[in-house]
Structures are given as C-alpha cells and as structure tokens.
Amino acid sequence: MLDEPTVGLDTARHTAVVELLDAARAEGCAVVAATHDPALIAHSDLEHRLSGPDPEEHGAGTNGPDRTIGPVPRTRAIPADALNPLVLSLIGILAAIGSFAVQSWQGGLLALLPIALLAPLAVRSVRGGLLRLTPILLSAAGLAWTTALLGDAPSLSGEAWLLGAKEAARITVFVAPGVLALGSVDPTALGDALGGRLRMPARVVAASVAGLIRTGHLGRQWEIITHARMLRGLGSRTSPRMLAGATLALLIDALRGAQQQALAMDSRGFATAITRTWALPSPLRRADLLGVAIALGLAVWPWLAEKLVG
C-alpha cells in the first residue's frame, strides 16, 4: 500500500519506482496506491476515482481552492521583514567588519549604541531576542573575565577589567547584528534570495536551507526525547544521566534525519539537475536602500566612535 509513491521524483527515479511496482505485481503482489500521477495510473489494472472537495463548500467559488504559492506566514510582522534577506546578511557582514575598529571600552560602548537602538526592529518577541542574545552575552562575559585574569594588565586590576570590557564589547559588536538580522529571516526566503538572486548552485542552496530548517526543529525534538525518557523512568529533566542520554539520542536523530533528507533530495534530482526554478522571486525594494545605509553605518560607526573618544 503506497501513498503518492512518485511525487517529486525526477525521471530516472520515477521510472525505477514504476518498474519496481510492475515487478511486484508480476510476482503476484497486490499493489494499492493513492496517487495523482497520470503516468502511474496508466500502469494500473483498476482505477477508482475519488471526488474532490466541493468548491462552493470551501468558499473557493467555481475556480477551486487557491493553490498560489506565497511567503511563509509570520506570527508577528516586524520592520526587518521589509528587507531582502541578502540585505540583512550584508548588515551582519559589514557590522562584523566594523567591529575591528573597536580599540577601547568607550569606543566599544558607543559602537553598541546603534545596535541596541535597531535591535527591536529585528525581534519578534522579547523572549526570542533574549534567547538569541544569551549565548553572545555569555561569551562576551567569559572573554571579559579571561582577559581581566590573563591579559597584559595586572590580573583583575581596574585596568585589566577595562581591557576585558573592550574585548567583550568588540565580540558583541562582531556577532550581535548578524544574529539579530538573520534570526528574523525565514530559511526558505533566504534560499530564494541565494538561488534566484545570487545564482548560487541549487544543490548547495537547497541543502543549506534544509539544514537551517532542521536546526530550528532541534528544540522541539529535544523536548520529545526528554519527555519520552522521563515517562520511561530514566531520570528527571536535570539529571546528568538524562542529559547525557538525551544529547546522544539527539545527535543520532540529527544524523539519521540528515541522511534521510539527503537521500530524498537526491531522489528528486538535486544530484544531477543543471538548472532549478525557485518558488518565489526575491525582489530588491526601496526599503533595501535604507537597509544598505544601515549596513554601511554599522561598518563606519565604530571607527567614528573611536575618533570621538580620542
């Protein structure tokens, strides 16, 4: 019993699947398939058609349901949605380049000022923004501590802590704009921009987008694994045994899922396709001019900030 066994396959895989089903039928197997594929239907001995939904009942008039491909719906619109994903990437790249100008803790604090002012424009929720910033802030705090303890200045002196503050500000300026900007981008929209606008190799783009989407599912998968283990009495949510086992299970699940997805992509022709179409266009609008100006400003501002503090 098969459900849409040929959907999305390239010509070679489609032929292989049909030959496999023909061989099974020749050996005496009964093959039952639900399909919309006319080529597969042509191979069947018996066809049973099911009527579709009533268009009037579903409010679609006489034209049937709307199957137009559109952008991924957002739970909450933010100003960053108006920018092309490539412009948001440019903001992160130029801000990282500008961070190399930070040479003092005063300049670092001034360099952080526009980032703090612009951050609300790229955050859908306070909780989500804090979750994205938490690893950066923890890394910055750790860098400040190690610099104050092991840097060139006397250990843990006032001078050493100021040096640590400079390094913490620099790493935050380096990473935070990119994390905030790209955190608001849908992976599918980014793939459309990379493939349709930059003409990057289709297989690389599709694999990268699939990886980003899978990464976004890790949190949900972690909850499933830990909940299942708790139900089996393997420990509490915070026990070391639970955390170690769940981490290993998550790693195995991620590797297995990546293998399955790679096989599925290759079966749809990503290994041999020369050209590909993209679901949606990735236009550059007037708002993107403002985004480019922000990117240039974040690149130049740290240099100006150091000049201001002398």
Image (cartoon, rainbow, N blue to C red):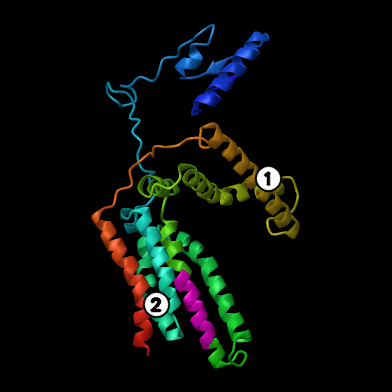
In this picture, which residue range is highlighted in magenta? 162-174
Q: Split into 4 quadrants, where in the image is the C terminus?
A: bottom left
Q: Is residue 233 visible?
A: yes
Amino acid under label 1?
Answer: Ala
Q: Secondary structure at mark 2?
A: helix
Prevailing secondary structure class for the magenta stretch in the rendered image: helix
Q: Quick check: 83 left or right of 205?
A: left
Q: Split into 4 quadrants, where in the image is the N terminus?
A: top right
Q: Quick check: 82 left or right of 29?
A: left
Q: Which residue is mark 2?
A: 111
State the residue in front, 204 or 260.
Answer: 204
Q: 10 Å neighbourhood of mark 1: few (<14), some, or many (≥20)?
A: few
Residue 207: x and y in percent read 52, 45
Look at the picture and state if 209 lies above or below 264.
Answer: below
Residue 239: x and y in percent read 73, 59
Q: Which residue is mark 1?
A: 228
State the residue in front, 166 or 58.
Answer: 166
State the residue in front, 45 or 90.
Answer: 90
Residue 118: x and y in percent read 35, 67
Residue 260: x and y in percent read 61, 38
Among the two numbered marks 1 and 2 on one chain, the one whose residue lies closer to the N terminus: 2
Q: Secondary structure at mark 1?
A: helix
**Distance (Cα) linking label 1 and label 2:** 46 Å
Look at the picture and state if 280 lies above or below 43.
Answer: below
Look at the picture and state if 160 lies above or below 90.
Answer: below
Image point (60%, 47%), residue name? 221
Q: Is residue 6 visible?
A: no
Look at the picture and state if 21 lies above or below 127.
Answer: above
Residue at far top of view: 45
The mark tally for this picture is: 2
Instruction: Tell me if residue 89 is in the magenta stretch.
Output: no
Query: Which circle, 1 or 2, is nearer the viewer?
Result: 2
